[in-house]
Image (cartoon, rainbow, N blue to C red):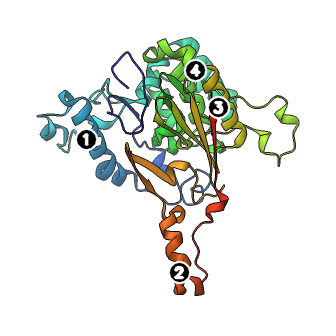
């Protein structure tokens, strides 16, 4: 993002000016072994550790480069034991609040001040989570800040859970991608992420900082009469996640077809990006539909204009090595078959 009023991204490696983040909340601390797989976590994380040892440093680094007045000369106060957590808590009076390092829970809290939006979102969340009418009325009584926290963590306090948390919201790339001056919203594959997509949609369509872009938000839709199709057909439901979209230049976007993004979603995205004149070229990269790879950004990542980091399984150099390595051949250890990959290019 360029400045407070302009949203524009034309590169994976350009200068970062503004970023959307979400602090690890109490919902992440409620990922228990019995639910970890359902909530898309491979392991259990310790909430205080991930906050203090990882996320807090990450936020400080972002603030140092993007909004230094919030951090320079104040570290001794921020890191004092009595103040430390308050600086990073979105619903606390001492929260850092930045126009450049933008906390999504803050944005949600702000749009919930509108009673009409609050009514709609409470009803929508309750429909997804199958809440009782009693719970729906309870939620309507919460303040915007408390309700925003509940929507993210699923809990209003330490002893009560109303519905499941959405711990994956910390991966903000997945909720939507800015392509030039347009925003492509995701359609997650997994049930555990449906509330994320709903919250993101309300933020992008209703928060003032996106007001100038309401007609530049791209939504993908399920195919007509998809509910009549057999469950085993790929076009049953359109699914796309942000980890499968890369903006490699102002005119060129990569879209992955993967475990989480299907061909119908890629086809819709290509058509809509061309129809709206967002880009001139789209490359579809089909990778194996396996949890091991998940998105194209777990297979390769652009780190400089002409430098990419690639997963070893897909490296031609590794394939050459294994083809001549007798030990690997004897043990039948093989890299991923490169011929299972497919790359298709479309130009407007």
What residue is shown with label 2? 324
Report x, y in % for residue 292: 58, 60
Q: Secondary structure at mark 4?
A: loop
Q: Secondary structure at mark 2?
A: helix
Tell me the CA gap for discs 2 and 3: 41 Å
Report x, y in % for residue 88: 31, 37
Q: Quadrant of the C terminus?
A: top right
The residue located at (32%, 27%) in the rendering is 100
Q: Are marks 1 and 2 in contact (CB under 8 Å)?
A: no
Give the numbered dot on residue 270: 3
Tell me the CA gap for discs 3 and 4: 11 Å
Decide: few, some or many residues near mark 3? Use Cα within 10 Å; few <14, some 14-19, many ≥20: many
Q: Quadrant of residue 162?
A: top right
- Say which of 287 and 192 sits in front: 287
Q: Quadrant of the N terminus?
A: top left
Mark 1 or 3: in front is: 3
Tell me the CA gap for discs 2 and 4: 48 Å
Mark 4 or 1: in front is: 4
What residue is shown with label 1? 61
């Amino acid at each position: 993002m360029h400045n407070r009023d302009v949203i524009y991204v034309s590169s994976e490696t350009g200068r970062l000016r503004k970023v959307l983040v979400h602090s690890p909340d109490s919902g992440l601390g409620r990922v228990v072994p019995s639910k970890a797989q359902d909530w898309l976590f491979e392991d259990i994380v310790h909430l205080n550790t991930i906050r203090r040892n990882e996320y807090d440093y990450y936020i400080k680094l972002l603030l140092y480069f993007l909004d230094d007045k919030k951090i320079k000369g104040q570290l001794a106060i921020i890191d004092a034991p009595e103040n430390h957590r308050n600086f990073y808590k979105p619903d606390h009076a001492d929260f850092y609040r930045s126009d450049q390092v933008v906390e999504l829970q803050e944005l949600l809290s702000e749009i919930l001040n509108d009673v009409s939006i609050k009514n709609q979102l409470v009803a929508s969340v309750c429909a997804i989570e199958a809440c009782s009418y009693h719970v729906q009325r309870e939620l309507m009584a919460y303040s915007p800040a408390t309700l925003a926290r509940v929507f993210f963590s699923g809990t209003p306090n330490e002893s009560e859970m109303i519905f499941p948390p959405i711990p994956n919201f910390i991966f903000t790339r997945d909720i939507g991608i800015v392509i030039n001056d347009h925003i492509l919203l995701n359609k997650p594959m997994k049930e555990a992420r449906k509330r994320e997509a709903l919250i993101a949609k309300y933020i992008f369509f209703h928060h003032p900082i996106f007001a100038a872009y309401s007609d530049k938000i791209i939504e993908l839709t399920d195919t007509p009469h998809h509910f009549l199709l057999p469950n085993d057909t790929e076009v049953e439901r359109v699914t796309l996640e942000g980890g499968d979209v890369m903006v490699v230049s102002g005119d060129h976007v990569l879209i992955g077809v993967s475990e989480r993004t299907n061909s119908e979603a890629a086809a819709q995205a290509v058509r809509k990006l061309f129809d709206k004149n967002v880009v001139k070229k789209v490359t579809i990269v089909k990778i194996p539909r396996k949890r091991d790879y998940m998105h194209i950004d777990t297979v390769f990542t652009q780190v400089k204009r002409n430098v990419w980091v690639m997963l070893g399984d897909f490296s031609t150099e590794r394939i050459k090595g294994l083809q001549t390595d007798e030990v690997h051949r004897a043990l039948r250890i093989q890299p991923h078959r490169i011929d299972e990959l497919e790359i298709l290019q479309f130009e407007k």
